[in-house]
Amino acid sequence: MRTDNFSTAVVKLLTGALGALVLAGCATTIPVTDTQQPEITLIVTGPGVGRQQMTDPPKDSWTGPGGVQLFDLKPNTVYRFTLTVSDQGGAARAQLRMPVSFTVTELAPATVVQVADSISRSLTLQGSRANPVTGLIISGSFRTPDTGSGLSFEFQTEGDDFGGASGRPNQRFMNVSASVGAH
């Protein structure tokens, strides 16, 4: 039995390490001119929502039919998230904002900066102009608050590139409308 548990642990570790290498983006060269905006993908998984994946392009605002929340999260429940910002000319910054009442854990990579104010919690990962990569990824878990009256909010995402060697950064924003315990 101990050998089986050890083998399973090694397989999980190697799979996770390989996944991190694949997802972190490849080294790239910042072009002289870059006018193309980065692409943003947000994935949220967990009870009641399964796997929700939103990408910009094609849409910068994700809502449900008639403008209501795209999905409803359960109160006091843990969900997993992954934010990816990709750009062939180098991803400069990835940022995800959510309500401050969400408790974030298992945040990766370790270089993600987490800042909270009275309303929102921002998770930011900076790229490096000296060592540019085609993608930045923030992942982790969050626990929703135990709210009795419901909470409507937006996941707000932002992705920036370097804008080329001498240009201004290109930015892309995406908002995803959601709620906790609204139904």
Image (cartoon, rainbow, N blue to C red):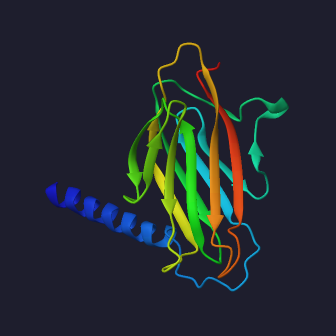
- Front in this rendered view, residue 121 or 174: 121
Residue 130: give x, y in percent of width and height: 49, 80
Look at the picture and state if 106 lies above or below 112.
Answer: above
Q: Residue at x 59, y 85 (%)?
A: 29
- State how many labels appear: 0
Residue found farthest to the left: 2
Q: Residue at x 56, y 38 (%)?
A: 98
Can you say whether 121 is above or below 82 in the image?
A: above
* Residue at figure coordinates x 53%, y 53% from the top left: 82
Residue 75 at what x, y percent from top left?
Answer: 51, 24
What percent of the width, then of the height, locates residue 100? Answer: 50, 33
Where residue 133 appears, as percent x and y from the top left, is: 54, 76
Of 164 and 135, nearer the camera is 164
List the single residue furthest toward the right. Answer: 66
> In the visual, does 34 lie left or right of 160?
right
Q: Quadrant of residue 176?
A: top right
Q: Is residue 83 found left or right of 165 in the rendered image?
A: left
Vertical position of residue 24 compared to residue 27: above or below? above
Residue at (79, 56) in percent of width and height: 58
Taking the image as shown, residue 22 lies to the left or right of residue 11, namely right
**Vertical placement of residue 173 versus 80, above or below:** below
Image quadrant assignment for residue 2 = bottom left
- Report the quarter where the C terminus lies: top right
Return the residue nearer the eye: 60 or 18.
60
